[in-house]
Image: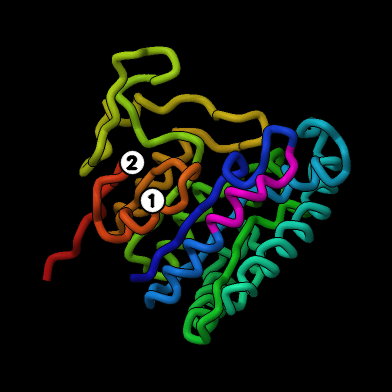
Amino acid sequence: MRVVIKVGTSTLTHPTGNLNIRKTEQLCRVLSDLKNAGHELVLVSSGAIGMGVGKLGLGRRPGDMPTKQAAAAVGQCELMYVYDNLFSQYHHVVAQVLLSAGDVNDPHRRTNVHNTLARLLELGALPILNENDAVSTDEIGVVTTIGENDTLSAIVARLVEADLLVLLSDINGLYTADPHKDPAARLIPEVRELTDEILALADGKGSELATGGMATKLKAARICMEAGCDMVIANGAEPAQLYDILDGRPVGTRFVGRRQEG
């Protein structure tokens, strides 16, 4: 299978912004094993700003844009150093690809991105993608910024014609209500259509260091489903769940892509 896996800031870091070594090591071990099994993987990784916050000793996510961008510049170096070190232990080569909205909106640049990713996969490398947060800003608008990695990962999944997108986050999936507030909330195991009722379940973002939320995940689901790609929302606390997800077992919430007839 060709699989895009998005990992959120809450999975990679502690609330302090410092690296969660145990989770990150587990994630890289599982992804390496899945590559050994013959799967083609693309990793979309959040965490640059969060790790920059920790390395710069800021204590919390900054509110002003220049400091966010500075944290991203520092954190992206740290993030790729960690990935390169961990994946090298399992003899896998990683490649960094930083994107902006123009890279996916402009047809010519989008073709270049597609060709680069396709060739990296052919060469057996593991592309690691993130938005170029050091120069992109959330304040400019959707024309010049992607904004968060749920959407970016769905765009990448469509671009590389992936079979599956997995969003690893700090939630188990899509619920009938907020499970933190409603003890009767039930996990929805499968979604075949994004009805008004499903879209109404979107809530705000989770952790302080994160930027995404259920609304961005449902936006990503729409992109994937329309492209014929399945998408799964699962909890990143246990990376070994990826084995079951790729085997088609029920984990989290699976959004079923529209299959093309014929």
Left or right? Give the position of 78 relative to 43. right
For the residue marked with disc 1, what is the amino acid?
A: Gln
Identify the residue at horizontal 38%, vertical 75% (top origin): 37
Real-space Cα distance between discs 2 and 1?
A: 9 Å
Say which element carries label 2.
Answer: loop
Main SS of the magenta part reads helix
Residue 227 visible in the shown view: no
Mark 2 is surrounded, within 10 Å at the Cα level, by few (under 14), some (14 to 19) or many (20 or more) other residues, namely: many
In magenta stretch: residue 123: no
Find the residue positioned furthest to the bottom. Answer: 123
Q: Position of residue 5 (x, y in %)?
A: 47, 57
Q: Quadrant of residue 159?
A: bottom left
Q: Position of residue 122 (x, y in %)?
A: 47, 85
Residue carrying label 1: 241
Residue 209 visible in the shown view: yes
- The label shown at residue 1 is none
Residue 215 versus residue 23: which sits nearer the camera? 23
Identify the residue at horizontal 85%, vertical 40% (top origin): 67
Identify the residue at horizontal 60%, vertical 65% (top origin): 128
The magenta region covers 17-27
Mark 2 touching mark 1, by CB under 8 A? yes
Quadrant the C terminus occupies = bottom left
Say which element carries label 1.
Answer: helix
Is the residue 254 above or below the residue 29 in the image? above
Mark 1 is surrounded, within 10 Å at the Cα level, by few (under 14), some (14 to 19) or many (20 or more) other residues, namely: some
Residue carrying label 2: 252
Is the residue 126 above or below the residue 66 in the image? below
Identify the residue at horizontal 39%, vertical 39% (top origin): 218
Q: Position of residue 194 (x, y in %)?
A: 27, 38
Find the residue positioned furthest to the left. Answer: 262
